[in-house]
Image (cartoon, rainbow, N blue to C red):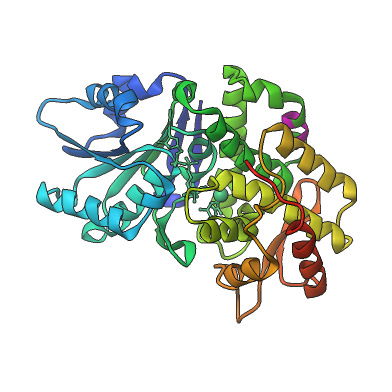
Amino acid sequence: MLLTVELGERSYPILIEPGCMNRKDQWSERVPHAEVVIVTNETIAPLYLDSLKRSLERSGRRLLSLTLPDGESYKSAETLGRIYDFLLEHSISRKAVLIALGGGVIGDLTGYAAATFQRGIDFIQVPTTLLSQVDSSVGGKTGINHPLGKNMIGAFKQPKSVVIDPAVLSTLPDRELSAGLAEVIKYGLIHDADFFEWLETNIDALLAKDADALVQAIARSCRLKADIVAADETEQGIRAILNLGHTFGHAIEAELGYGLWLHGEAVAAGMVMASDLSQRQGWIDGEVTERARNLLSAARLPVAPPPQMTPDRFMNHMARDKKVESGQLRLVLLEALGRATVTSTFDPARLEACLSAFCTSHSQP
Ligand SMILES: NC(=O)c1ccc[n+]([C@@H]2O[C@H](COP(=O)([O-])OP(=O)(O)OC[C@H]3O[C@@H](n4cnc5c(N)ncnc54)[C@H](O)[C@@H]3O)[C@@H](O)[C@H]2O)c1
Ligand SMILES: O=C(O)C(=O)C[C@@H](O)[C@H](O)[C@H](O)COP(=O)(O)O
Ligand SMILES: [Zn+2]
């Protein structure tokens, strides 16, 4: 299956096909470059690096790879520096392409290196987690974390293409699969009530890694994200709905230290909090929050923050959120199942009540 992210001259394809990562013909049309650098990590390299290299081999091509340490804590300026060092030590030119082979951490890091190395070189996303296949590989948000805030340094840099091989999910740990499902459920909540219903019916098949269910969930998620990104590439408006639960979730990730809770886990708890606040505003019925909570629980995700979080700690982090404008906090809230809005028009007292309620009902992934 081939989808397109429609961005004029920067449009690019998303290929979704089991086994496509190892199809030489597919790569030959996609990568004309004479210099190719694959960036991956220590977990993924032994599983998929050799086969990808074999598929990319071509006479006269320089094919290099860089294997980084694994973990969210390595989505840092220091690791980014290691990528620059490698590219410079190997005299990589601006005609090269970087291929990100891995999850969202490798994708975000490699994309940002591609955005900035010699003021910008090509890159391709080969996402290997469910989360990266349904979300981070599409849309061009790249960057690194700062100790004081998630993804605080970065750039919009669209890949040349996204190559999604759902077969690689066979080796993905269950906890990571669930984390990916959080972002899948997000699409249903913000933009597609029918998809949310489909997820309610198919959650067990997805958790069991049913191949057909996974391809359907990946394709629907990518289609939704591609449409939103095409409408608002640099988040001037509607794209911000993709941030449902993230203001709360990023606060959890930063407060705990990156990697303790997975991104998808923090977002899951954050989405229940956002739904609860929307309910307190009177914008949605309790039934929507209940269905969100039930589906996220069924996906084996946390539905409340960890015990370390207090209302003050939430507020400290949330004050630095990228959606803050003129000192005013803006949140993604729900107006219905399948409809979200970015707004500062919530009652601060209701936010306080929401934070207090959740900071007494903890959750652990
Ligand atoms: N750019 C965006 O639009 C965007 C969107 C969502 C999330 N993100 C970012 O993505 C990151 C989270 O991504 P993630 O959930 O993919 O985490 P991740 O990149 O840390 O990968 C999760 C774990 O799975 C391992 N792994 C990856 N593929 C595997 C496979 N096929 N088999 C076995 N193990 C495998 C990784 O080595 C890692 O240990 C966060 O930093 C988040 O902020 C970015
Ligand atoms: O693509 C987007 O836009 C998103 O917001 C997708 C999110 O799932 C993702 O976590 C993104 O990295 C968050 O971006 P940020 O701008 O809030 O750091
Ligand atoms: Zn996210």
Question: How many circles with numbers are drawn on the protein?
Answer: 0
Q: Is residue 114 visible?
A: yes
Q: Is residue 222 left or right of residue 12?
A: right
Give how far across and how far down residue 136 sits, in percent: 49, 45
Q: Residue at x 90, y 51 (%)?
A: 285
Q: Residue at x 76, y 30 (%)?
A: 200
Give how far across and how far down residue 255 sits, in percent: 54, 61
Note whether 73 is above or below 166 in the view shown.
below
Note whether 227 is above or below 318 in the view shown.
above
Note whether 70 is above or below 298 in the view shown.
below
Note whether 59 is above or below 317 in the view shown.
above
Q: Magenta segment, which residues?
A: 195-199
Q: Does the magenta stretch include residue 235?
A: no
Q: Which of 21 and 206 is in front in this view?
A: 206
Q: Residue at x 14, y 48 (%)?
A: 92
Q: Is residue 196 magenta?
A: yes
Q: Residue at x 37, y 44 (%)?
A: 106
Q: In this view, does 267 lie to the left or right of 40?
A: right
Give how far across and how far down residue 318 sits, in percent: 61, 68
Q: In which quarter of the image is residue 165?
A: top left
> What predominant SS class does the magenta segment belong to?
helix
Q: Is residue 257 left or right of residue 68?
A: right
Q: Quadrant of residue 235?
A: bottom right
Q: Is residue 244 visible?
A: no
